[in-house]
Image: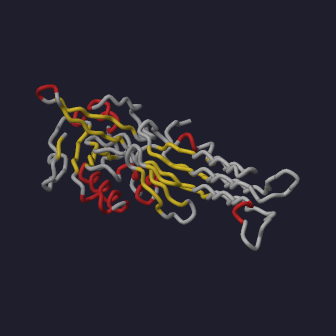
């Protein structure tokens, strides 16, 4: 079973507040002096935090329920209950949180340390000492603590990459990322070899030892209709949303005879129908498997450049 999980449901609940205490002072022969019941402690909060050490949402696939600790009940002698311990849930950078039922976007945790309050703890109940007044000298009651906030959430992980490799199945995306980075995805000569996204870091060495680097995402192969959800299209396409550059890979030796220009047209249409703004980002078109065709001339293969940068 795959260890990469990029979508899950999560039920969170803040801790319940502790109950207030009913208590009276004992002063010598007086069995019931003034009230001295303490307040209950507040329930713990549930926080969701982006952590760069977390790679997927696997931890929640089989265990979706998370609850913070309850507040401690108040005691006599004006002793207040201890606050419940907060629960911190770590998720990958780039996690999007929405309401599971309404679909409302609640939070985006983009960088390490970003945090969001997912479930507030309940308020602690007041002890009977808080109800003492001129008219009520011996209050024999206290408040119960409030319940913690509970909700069902949908978590989606969207890869944080500079460049997204987009293409049809078996177009050579995994081979390319394995050559330009240290990533080692599974590579085989059949479609849908890549079933989960892969990330690779490309380092550009410059004079003097200094250099720059950028992150490349190998997205599983798309098929026509991906923007409508075919072939798990939505699950794959969401990983290109934050990429700054689109790198379209066209197969120069496609077995079905689809021309490079037609492949590009279909890929651009799927990207545009999923998120129109993706078409406004810089993009490259990369021709793959030139060794099979024996040519690196895209025009010769029916490709018509329109001013964008393209290479094989």
Measured along the vertical axis of the image, is residue 177 above or below residue 263? Answer: above
Quarter holding the C terminus? top left
Is 122 left or right of 33, judged from the image as shown?
left
Q: Is residue 54 visible?
A: yes
The colour scheme is secondary structure
Quarter of the view holding residue 120: bottom right
Q: Is residue 188 visible?
A: no
Is 189 left or right of 295, judged from the image as shown?
right
Q: Which of the two residues, 287 or 18, is positioned nearer the viewer here?
A: 18
Measured along the vertical axis of the image, is residue 90 above or below residue 187? Answer: below
State the image coordinates of residue 203 (x, y, percent, origin top left): 23, 32
Quarter holding the N terminus? top right
State the image coordinates of residue 134 (x, y, percent, origin top left): 73, 72
Q: Which of the two residues, 99 or 255, is positioned nearer the viewer here?
A: 99
Quarter of the view holding residue 165: top left
Measured along the vertical axis of the image, is residue 172 above or below residue 72? Answer: above
- In the displayed orientation, state which residue is furthest to the bottom: 135
Q: Which of the two residues, 168 or 151, is positioned nearer the viewer here?
A: 151
State the image coordinates of residue 108 (x, y, percent, origin top left): 42, 54
Is 20 left or right of 209, judged from the image as shown?
right
Measured along the vertical axis of the image, is residue 276 above or below residue 92? Answer: below
For the point 44% across and 54% down, which residue is it?
234
């Amino acid at each position: 079973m795959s260890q990469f999980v990029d979508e899950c449901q999560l039920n969170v609940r803040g801790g319940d507040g502790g109950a207030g205490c009913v208590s009276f002072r004992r002063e010598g022969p007086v069995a019931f002096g003034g009230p001295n019941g303490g307040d209950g402690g507040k329930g713990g909060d549930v926080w969701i935090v982006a952590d760069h050490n977390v790679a997927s949402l696997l931890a929640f696939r089989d265990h979706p329920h998370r609850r913070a600790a309850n507040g401690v009940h108040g005691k006599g002698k004006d002793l207040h209950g201890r606050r419940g311990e907060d629960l911190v849930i770590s998720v990958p950078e780039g996690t999007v949180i929405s309401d599971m039922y309404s679909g409302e976007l609640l939070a985006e945790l983009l960088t390490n340390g970003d945090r969001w309050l997912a479930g507030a703890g309940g308020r602690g109940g007041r002890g009977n000492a808080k109800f003492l007044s001129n008219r009520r000298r011996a209050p024999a009651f206290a408040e119960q603590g409030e319940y913690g906030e509970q909700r069902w959430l949908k978590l989606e992980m969207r890869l944080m990459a500079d460049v997204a490799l987009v293409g049809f199945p078996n177009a050579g995306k995994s081979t390319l990322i394995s050559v330009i980075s240290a990533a080692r995805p599974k590579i085989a000569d059949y479609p849908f070899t890549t079933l989960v996204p892969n990330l690779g870091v490309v380092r550009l060495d410059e004079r003097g030892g200094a250099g720059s680097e950028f992150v490349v995402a190998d997205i599983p192969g798309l098929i026509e209709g991906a923007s409508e959800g075919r072939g798990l299209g939505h699950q794959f396409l969401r990983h290109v949303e934050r990429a700054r550059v689109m790198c379209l890979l066209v197969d120069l030796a496609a077995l079905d005879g689809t021309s490079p220009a037609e492949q590009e047209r279909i890929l651009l249409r799927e990207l545009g129908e999923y998120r129109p703004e993706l078409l406004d980002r810089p993009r490259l078109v990369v021709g793959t498997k030139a060794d099979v065709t024996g040519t690196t001339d895209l025009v010769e293969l029916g490709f018509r450049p329109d001013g964008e940068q393209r290479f094989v």
